[in-house]
Image (cartoon, coloured by chain):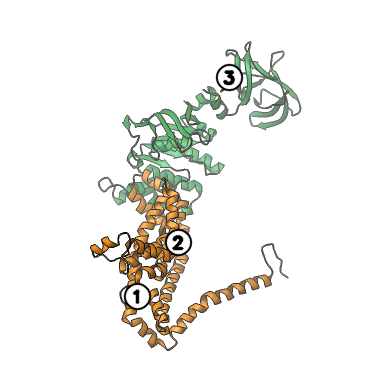
Chain colours: A orange, B green
Amino acid sequence: MSPQNSTQDPLWVKALVLSLVAAFLVLVLILPLVSVFAEALRRGIDPALEAIANPDALAAIKLTLLTAAIAVPFNIVFGVCAAWAVAKHDFAGKSLLISLIDLPFSVSPVVAGLIYVLIFGAHGWFGSWLIDHDIRIIFAVPGIILATIFVTFPFVARELIPLMQEQGVDEEEAAVSLGANGLTAFFRVTTPNIRWGLLYGVLLCNARAMGEFGAVSVVSGHIRGLTNTMPLHVEILYNEYDFVGAFSVAALLCLLSILTLVLKGILEVLQPQVGARGH
Amino acid sequence: MTISIRAVEKQFARYPALRGVSLDIEPGELLALLGPSGSGKTTLLRIIAGLEFPEAGQVLFDQRDVTFASAAARQVGFVFQQYALFRHMTVAKNVAFGLDVRKAATKPARAEISRRVDVLLGLVELGGLGGRYPSQLSGGQRQRVALARALAVSPEVLLLDEPFGALDATVRKSLRKELRRIHNATGVTTIFVTHDQEEALDLADRVAILNLGQIEQVGTPAEVYDNPASAFVCGFVGEANRFEGHVENGRFVSGAVSFPATTASGPKLGFVRPHDLTLSVGEEAGFDLHIDRVIAQGPVIQVEAKTTDHRRIDAAFARQDVASLTAGTTIRVTARKAHLFDPVA
């Protein structure tokens, strides 16, 4: 028998724990993923591709990409600003701001959607004003984008706040004492130090922006070809017993998520090398 | 450049950090701000740098009021306690930063910047390391990079916050000499903050001693050591045995301890440096010390002893004056010099 130290558990314990974890992963994560692709390709590749090439599906894909393309940049700008304000400055109401940033994580997405209906809907606070000016938010693309921004709000800021807090303000102060103005210090000192955390937050934000269902479902109105995002389109097809169609679009969504994960993995491999230089 | 600090006050959330501090720093001077933690010395340095702003008072650079001028506008070089090197930039880029961020009109040509970086890295003896990243350097090397970076902008004043605090004792000593050499080579007015009195006395032309947000004394190392202005300075700068007692009939008396005093009668705090204790000869009045330990350190013999009423005393004698001292014996000593202060209420 090999010598054991206190941190080495017996072999059978390790085997048991590992197989439990593996079994759980297969059951909960891998099996469903495989079944999505299996269902999509049940009748071969052609029906699956047809379902994706359907004009309503294409419209849903476009809307999803558009939503992400607007929500993600918005959250980058806001997330960086909020993290910078919280981590590098002291001001009254700071803890309130941190709580507010967390709000979308703690509120159910359905409630988030309802809030927007309450504010911008036909019977909401600004409803009659919006109708008078012929501005459509609820049951239209702006509502979907607003709801998506709301639910993806914390990702970038939450990723950056601890990072920026840990880095402190010394480097910025050094930059300023060397004659840099605030903007120069921000772009030449702050931003390079947070770029990896920022990319990571952006990927998570993007994944959620494309996959959000609940909040978007409430404000969308489910108008085919107009206000359906991919997750909503999947639901509609499924409710109509078009399983191949539903799973084909779902498979495409899965592929987008897997792409995000692969990008994240690549980042994590790259980061230590640059980080070792950078830290 | 002359720096004048006039009645500066600074308050942090709960406690006052500076309470009416005034100080003049002469051109080309090397001044130490010395004090225990929480004495306000770093706050004062940051106010001079423009990284903090006072609630009251003024900061003048050559009669120019810079109290609320930004750090960028002040032309100061600041070396941070943890160096604050830009971790994503090479050493050369770090040093070049201050020149690199200048507006086009005053920005030197690229070749000129790189020449200047080379000169500065040479000055701090880091030639050839320009391509490294801060994480690839030792603590002492990082400190030198921080110094070179601060000097790159040709500052009118160089400010250092606990410059050697994060270094081990050997590196600390050699960098101390280095800073003195660089100060002599550049002639730039330099202010550094330290809590280490040995460092301050060793390096500075003048020392300003802070306690609880106020300046207790400003003077040359010899002045603050030989003529401490307050009980705090006497206890903080150099070693001293401290006695609570009173003066009566020309003698200071504190329990079993007594020695001649020239001040008026009344309750006093008495301080006697270890080397100001001398063996008392013949019937001359003095007090007895029981020797616990004898440490022979080169020309000085240090003695750890107790008074007859069991108070610990440190004494130091020149070796030629005391031929043989052994632990366990008793000697009779008196104070050749003592510092007496009125007890603080």
Q: How many numbered marks are there?
A: 3
Q: Secondary structure at mark 3?
A: strand
In the picture, measured across the screen, residue B52 lies left or right of residue A12, that is left
In the depicted view, which residue is nearer to us: A40 or B324? A40
Q: Do the CB atoms of the residues marked 1 and 3 lie less than 8 Å apart?
A: no
Please say if A181 is above or below A233. Answer: above
Residue at 48% of width from left, 78% of height from top?
A: A33
In 3D space, how far apart are the residues under numbered discs 3 and 2 (Cα atoms)? Answer: 69 Å
Which residue carries the number 1 mark?
A61
Which residue carries the number 2 mark?
A107
Which residue carries the number 3 mark?
B340
Chain ID, mark 3: B
Chain ID, mark 1: A
User: Could you say where residue A273 lies in the image, as x and y percent from the top left?
Assistant: 47, 62
Same subunit: marks 3 and 2: no
User: Could you say where residue B259 lies in the image, as x and y percent from the top left?
Assistant: 65, 17
Which quadrant is the C terminus of chain B positioned in? Answer: top right
Which residue lies most toward the front here?
A123
In the depicted view, which residue is nearer to us: A107 or B222? A107
Q: Earlier in the sequence, mark 1 or mark 2?
A: 1
Please say if A62 is above or below B81. Answer: below
Residue type at the position of mark 3? Leu
In the depicted view, which residue is nearer to us: A66 or A245? A245
In 3D space, how far apart are the residues under numbered discs 1 and 2 (Cα atoms)? Answer: 27 Å
Residue type at the position of mark 2? Val
Q: Quadrant of residue B44?
A: top left
Which one is in front in this view, the residue at disc 1 or the one at disc 3? 1
Same subunit: marks 1 and 2: yes
